[in-house]
Image (spheres, grey):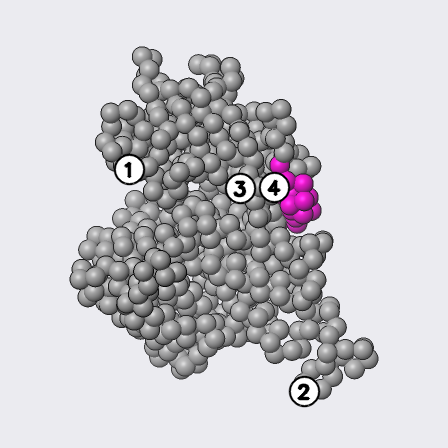
């Protein structure tokens, strides 16, 4: 069985030596000293290792079952869910007035990483609930908040998001689900939704569905979409559960991965719902949920790569195969361990440098969300809006790539289910698709986010990189291996953005044909910036006489590896972008 150990030391390094949480001026951050965060992460890590990891393969093999209208989760899931509820793990950053602990979002993010690495399918049940909570918190009336949020906070009730229909995915303006107004102020919801994660299950007494639907007579297309709260079970005025609503699970999808999560076809047959937010402004409210979910999905990408990497390292150290080309390193054994071979080292270093850089990038994103919300900082909000498609798209593309690279380390055993590596790859694959497929993330980045507020936020990002380079310009020990590659990558990113500005108005295809390359180029520069910051922090620790020199020396070595072996990809992506759309669009549809 695969194992997992929460990388608490790495997490603490980012939280305190790179981001300096307790030194920031964000409300609530002063309490986040290393002792406090360390205690929280150590305890979360124990739950991840002892409770959730053993259920990961159970969920993969058993899946969820629909029996007589009831969705049953895999053995052990319900008891584990109850344990996390009782420990308050699902309400870390929820508002205290609704029963939460009121911690900053970055603590939710760090804890969530351990649970996702341990059991991604299981964690999705509370992950979607967190998104529903946030949408109602932001857009609900006081009465709606009082009615729904306390139980969502504790996960006594769970939540979902219902967007996709059989005939429409990304183009939600095509949806057919109707919401007919009733005399009592409610709406009658009729239609079918598909691909609904955690749509039904046996771990909560109620499920609060957030459903996109069209009110008859409203504007055509996406402008006529509204969002509704539709519970599985009706809730009386005194908070007690009443009759079953007209909501049912018609089918559980058979999927490539995340078998332990119930992905449902949901049928709404004259179900009762209530408008959340304004009429015909449903996408505004839903995007509160989707943007948070996209950050969580980006985390899923690297969290699956993390657990796959941990097991690949163990296997590479244990598996004897061949001899080192420079001479036997295990002379008393029949062969040397796999880890002596340069190509195995290369793939492990690819994985390590990505995972650690991605963790820093995601925590920085969570930090920006805290700053935006707790300090009402418009600059932070604009920056995280720009970076969200990069976090979601780049980290999940690469997370899947490196989960399969970890599988490759095992050779034939990586293809055998009992070793567990296949599950990591299969589970990671969905993250590239849901919450907006990665091609859509790239189009959103290039087609909308770059020009947001007149390009203010992308220019702000360039200024952050320039300021970092200028601040450390005199450090010769970092110049060649860290600063110069970051500078080159940043110049490639700026040139690509300038190309889009020059050609976008003349031929939009020239810009959009390079959108995925731009998302990856941007991702590499973001991870390069993170590795620059980590290298500075590691060097400061070593210069200060840190006792754990191996840890910090490994950080510097990994930073240099990323800059030498991954950052050069920015030039390739820039070249592809600047080739335009002629070769991409050359064939007629019939020629494919």
Secondary structure beneath label 3: helix
Disc 3 packing (10 Å; few <14; some 14–19; many ≥20): many
Say whether disc 3 or disc 2 marks the residue closer to the N-terminus.
3
Badge 2 is on which residue?
326
Say whether disc 1 or disc 4 marks the residue closer to the N-terminus.
1
Q: Residue at x 69, y 64 (%)?
A: 412
The residues bearing labels 3 and 1 have C-alpha atoms spaced at a distance of 27 Å
Q: Is residue 470 above or below residue 229?
A: below
Range shown magenta? 45-64
Disc 4 packing (10 Å; few <14; some 14–19; many ≥20): many
Pinpoint residue 247: horizontal percent, then vertical percent. 48, 24
Pinpoint residue 371: horizontal percent, then vertical percent. 35, 49
Pinpoint residue 417: horizontal percent, then vertical percent. 69, 54
Q: Which mark lies nearer to you, 4 or 2?
A: 4
Q: Which mark lies nearer to you, 3 or 4?
A: 4
Q: Nearer the viewer, residue 337 or 251?
A: 251
Q: Nearer the viewer, residue 572 or 350?
A: 572
The residues bearing labels 1 and 2 have C-alpha atoms spaced at a distance of 63 Å
Badge 4 is on which residue?
260
What is the magenta segment's predominant secondary structure? helix
Badge 3 is on which residue?
124
Q: Is residue 155 above or below residue 551?
A: above
């Amino acid at each position: 069985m695969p194992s997992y150990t929460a990388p608490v030391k790495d997490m603490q390094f980012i939280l305190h030596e790179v981001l300096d949480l307790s030194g920031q001026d964000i409300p609530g951050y002063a309490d986040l000293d290393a002792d406090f965060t360390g205690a929280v992460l150590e305890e979360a890590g124990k739950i991840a290792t002892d409770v959730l990891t053993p259920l990961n393969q159970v969920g993969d093999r058993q899946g969820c079952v629909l029996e007589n209208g009831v969705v049953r989760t895999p053995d052990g899931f319900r008891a584990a869910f109850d344990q996390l509820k009782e420990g308050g793990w699902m309400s870390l950053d929820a508002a205290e007035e609704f029963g939460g602990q009121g911690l900053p979002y970055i603590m939710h993010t760090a804890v969530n990483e351990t649970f996702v690495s341990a059991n991604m399918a299981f964690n999705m049940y509370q992950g979607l609930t967190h998104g529903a909570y946030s949408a109602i918190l932001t857009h609900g009336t006081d009465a709606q908040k009082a009615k729904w949020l306390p139980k969502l906070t504790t996960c006594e009730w769970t939540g979902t998001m219902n967007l996709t229909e059989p005939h429409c995915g990304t183009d939600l303006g095509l949806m057919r689900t109707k919401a007919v107004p009733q005399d009592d102020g409610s709406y009658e919801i009729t239609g079918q939704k598909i691909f609904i994660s955690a749509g039904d299950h046996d771990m909560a007494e109620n499920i609060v569905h957030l459903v996109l639907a069209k009110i008859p007579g409203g504007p055509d297309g996406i402008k006529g979409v509204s969002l509704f709260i539709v519970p599985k079970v009706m809730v009386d005025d005194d908070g007690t559960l009443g009759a079953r609503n007209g909501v049912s699970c018609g089918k559980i999808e058979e999927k490539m991965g995340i078998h332990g999560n119930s992905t449902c076809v949901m049928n709404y047959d004259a179900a009762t719902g209530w408008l959340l937010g304004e009429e015909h402004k449903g996408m505004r409210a839903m995007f509160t949920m989707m943007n948070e979910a996209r950050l969580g999905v980006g985390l899923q990408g690297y969290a699956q790569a993390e657990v796959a990497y941990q097991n690949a390292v163990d296997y590479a150290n244990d598996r004897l195969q061949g001899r080192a080309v420079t001479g036997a390193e295990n002379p008393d054994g029949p062969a040397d361990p796999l880890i002596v071979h340069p190509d195995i080292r290369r793939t492990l270093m690819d994985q390590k440098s990505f995972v650690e850089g991605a963790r820093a990038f995601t925590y920085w994103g969570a930090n920006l969300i805290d700053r935006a919300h707790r300090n009402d900082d418009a600059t932070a909000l604009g920056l995280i809006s720009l970076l969200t498609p990069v976090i979601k798209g780049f980290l999940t593309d690469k997370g899947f790539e490196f989960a399969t690279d970890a599988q490759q380390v095992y050779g034939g055993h990586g293809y055998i289910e009992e070793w567990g590596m296949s599950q990591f790859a299969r589970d990671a694959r969905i993250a590239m698709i849901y919450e907006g497929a990665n091609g859509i993330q790239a189009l959103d980045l290039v087609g909308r986010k770059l020009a947001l507020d007149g390009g203010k936020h992308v220019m702000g990002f360039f200024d952050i990189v320039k300021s970092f380079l200028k601040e450390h310009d005199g450090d010769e020990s970092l110049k060649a291996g860290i600063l110069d590659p970051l500078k080159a990558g940043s110049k490639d990113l700026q040139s690509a953005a300038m190309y889009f500005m020059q050609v976008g108005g003349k031929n939009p295809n020239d810009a959009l044909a390079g959108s995925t390359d731009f998302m990856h180029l941007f991702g590499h520069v973001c991870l390069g910036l993170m590795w620059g910051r980590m290298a500075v922090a590691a060097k400061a620790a070593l210069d200060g006489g840190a006792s754990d020199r191996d840890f910090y020396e490994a950080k510097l070595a990994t930073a240099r590896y990323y800059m030498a072996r991954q950052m050069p990809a920015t030039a390739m992506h820039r070249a592809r972008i600047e080739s335009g759309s002629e070769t991409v669009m050359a064939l007629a549809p019939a020629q494919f």
